[in-house]
Structures are given as C-alpha cells and as structure tokens.
Image (cartoon, coloured by chain):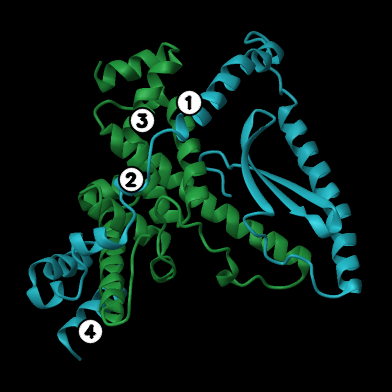
Chain colours: A green, B cyan
C-alpha cells in the first residue's frame, strides 16, 4: 500500500492505517522537534500533537505537495506554539510571582535519546535551528524550507545563513575546548 | 571593512528580496565567505538526527489513544449541535468565555493569596516552574483545542491549572 492509498484509507476512517504513516515519519519528526525545542519531552509532545493534527486535517492535504513537507509544516507550527505558550506561561508566572524569570533558569534537558547542546540552543533562534535542521538533516532547499516555515524563500535563506554563520563561529570557538553537539 | 563584514552587514541591513538573495547567492559561491559558514556535515554533527532518536514504540500508542477517544466522543458534540435548518448562535462561545473567566478567577483566588503568603513567609515561591512541577497538556475546551498548564506547588499543597485556547486561523494570539 503506498502513501496515497494509506491516506485514502485513513480518510475512510481506518485509524490503524495511520500507524504506518506515524512509524514512517516519527523519527525525522521527533528529530526536527528536538532541534527546534531542545528537549525530548516537549519534542515528543509536539510530535504526538502533530500526528493528531495530521490525522484531523488529512482531508485538507493537497497530494500535489510533498506529504513530508506538509507534516513538517504542521510540526513547525506546533513547535512555535509550544515556544510561544512557554513564553506566555513565563510571563503569566512572572506576573503572578511579581518577579522576573530568567531565561537561563530552564531545567536542563534530559540527555536521553538525543538532545541538543545548550550552546546551540542558546546561540541559534528556534527558526534558525529549524532551517538548519531541514537543510542539513532533510536536505531541503530554501524553497522547501520556506514552505515548511510558511515564509518567503528569501526569509528562509536568511534564517539558514544566520544559522550556518553562528554555528561555524561556535565550532571555531569550541575547536580547542571540548564537545559541541547532540548528546 | 573586510569582505565578510560587508556581507554580514548587507544581509542584516538589506530588506527581504532580490538584493539580499543576491548577497546570499554570492556567499554560496564565494570560497572566502563559504569558509565562514558551517557546512551540511558540520551541521549534522551537532544536530539531533532521525537515527539518534530511538525506537518507534513511543508515539503511536499515544496518538492512537487520542484518536480513538476522539472518535468515540465525536457523537456527543454532534448530538447537541444546532440543526442545519434553524441555525442560531450556539452558546459554546459563551461557554468558552464563561469557562475562561471562571478559570481566571480561580487562578486569581489561588495565586494571589499564595504569592502574598509566600512573600510573608520569605523566599521559596517557585518562580521558575521545573519539568517536575509544570505540565503542559493539550486539551479540548468547549470543542476547541487548548493548552492546559498544570503547575504543582507541593510546598503549598496547591495545583494551578490554567488553560488557553489556541487561536483560530487569522485570529491574533
């Protein structure tokens, strides 16, 4: 059964067919979520929510587009929602506690099954990390990255440029010191 | 000003469009500029890759559970939906607004005395929710997707619950 047949089966209400889709895409989806969000727990939640959204909106999927790009687009949107939600939560909590909450006070991500190094998370913006991961891991072009990130190709190129520039600077800086990278 | 500094400045200063694209195109073809950018392999060396993330046993049961729950619960909203012939303003919007006000009021009642008590007692109020104390869940509130923030404050034997519905398309968050 190919992907389009599976999608048709899901649309006919056969949830079990969706399992193959989840199994096929979950690893790259979690990896991208990890690269954007930085920790496994949030990444798995975003991944779960992404597949639920994919299933809910399968009828809206245009088969002329890449299914993978469409899933990544939903995931990217979801990850930005998580980041926004956390920012709003911090603001709410800070308001409640009447004191500022430092950004760096985030709990360290659990080092299970791959997590992004703190240096990368701090140096690169989430959109830059998304562009970099889509380019390096998935081999997407600027136009495809723009489709995932729902921005102009020019904007995607700039995100990628800054991500590569910052990463190179970090690598150069860390060359003599120690490790930099996914754990 | 050096060549690379000019490139960085141009990318930073130029508005989105052809000119900035031209600069970035130049970077791709220029060995001197290219050396200032991380390559694919370098990036892959520091990013989390699909093969790093482990087995596929985790996600499907969670997704299946939600989808099955939704499909069995989907009868309920349609049962109370207004018939197509006689459409009137269904009070779910009001229910959502009323729910939001109730939750906000509950939070105010819980948080404000909590903050005052903690201030009176000195430091110790968990200014930063930790991964143990904070859970962010997806929920459905009045038929709309929402984020549910649950914070445990064990020292006060208190749990704060805050939900925020997700904005619809075109709606500002």
Q: Secondary structure at mark 4?
A: helix
Subunit of mark 3? A
Same chain? Circles 1 and 4: no
Image coords of residue B107 (percent x, y): 82, 51
Location of mark 2 (residue): A148
Secondary structure beneath disc 2?
Answer: helix
Along the viewing direction, whichever of A22 and B104 lies nearer the viewer: A22
Question: Which residue is denoted by mark 4 in the rendering?
Answer: B5
The residue singled out by tag 3 in the image is A23
The answer to whether marks 3 and 2 sit on the same chain is: yes
Q: Is residue B150 left or right of residue A57?
A: right
Q: CA distance from mark 2 to mark 4?
A: 30 Å
Classify mark 1: residues with Cα within 10 Å, few (<14), some (14-19) or many (20+): few
Whole-percent x and y of residue A125? Answer: 41, 64
Q: Residue at x 31, y 27 (%)?
A: A62
The mark nearer the N terminus, 3 or 2, is 3
Q: Is residue B30 above or below residue A87?
A: below
Give the structural element (helix, strand or loop) at label 3. Answer: helix
Name the chain under label 4.
B
Dot in front, 3 or 2? 3
Among the 4 quarters of the image, the one containing residue B99: top right
């Amino acid at each position: 059964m190919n992907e389009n047949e599976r999608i048709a089966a899901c649309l006919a209400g056969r949830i079990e067919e969706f399992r193959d889709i989840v199994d096929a895409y979950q690893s790259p989806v979690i990896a991208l979520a990890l690269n954007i969000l930085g920790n496994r727990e949030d990444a798995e939640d975003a991944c779960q929510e992404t597949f639920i959204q994919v299933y809910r909106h399968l009828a809206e999927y245009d088969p002329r587009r890449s299914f993978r790009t469409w899933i990544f687009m939903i995931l990217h949107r979801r990850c930005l929602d998580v980041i926004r939600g956390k920012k709003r939560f911090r603001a709410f909590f800070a308001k409640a506690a009447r004191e500022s909450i430092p950004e760096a006070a985030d709990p360290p991500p659990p080092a299970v099954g791959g997590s992004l190094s703190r240096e990368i998370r701090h140096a690169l913006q989430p959109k830059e990390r998304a562009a970099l991961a889509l380019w390096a891991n998935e081999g997407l072009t600027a136009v495809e990255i723009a489709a995932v990130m729902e921005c102009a190709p020019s904007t995607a190129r700039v995100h990628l440029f800054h991500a590569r520039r910052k990463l190179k600077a970090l690598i150069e800086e860390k060359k003599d010191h120690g490790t930099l990278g996914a754990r | 000003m050096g060549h690379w500094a000019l490139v960085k400045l141009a990318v930073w200063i130029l508005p989105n469009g052809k000119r900035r694209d031209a600069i970035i195109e130049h970077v791709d073809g220029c060995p001197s500029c290219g050396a200032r950018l991380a390559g694919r392999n370098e990036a892959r060396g520091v990013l989390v890759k699909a093969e790093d993330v482990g087995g596929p046993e985790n996600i499907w049961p969670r997704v299946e559970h939600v989808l099955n729950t939704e499909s069995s619960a989907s009868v309920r909203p349609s049962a109370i939906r207004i018939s197509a012939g006689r459409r009137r303003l269904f009070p779910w919007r009001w229910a959502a607004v009323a729910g939001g006000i109730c939750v906000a009021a509950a939070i105010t009642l819980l948080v404000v005395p909590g903050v005052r008590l903690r201030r009176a007692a000195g430091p110790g109020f968990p200014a930063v929710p930790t991964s143990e104390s904070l859970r962010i869940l997806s929920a459905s509130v009045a038929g709309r997707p929402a984020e549910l923030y649950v914070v445990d404050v064990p020292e006060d034997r208190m749990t704060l619950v805050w939900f925020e519905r997700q904005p619809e398309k075109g709606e500002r968050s």
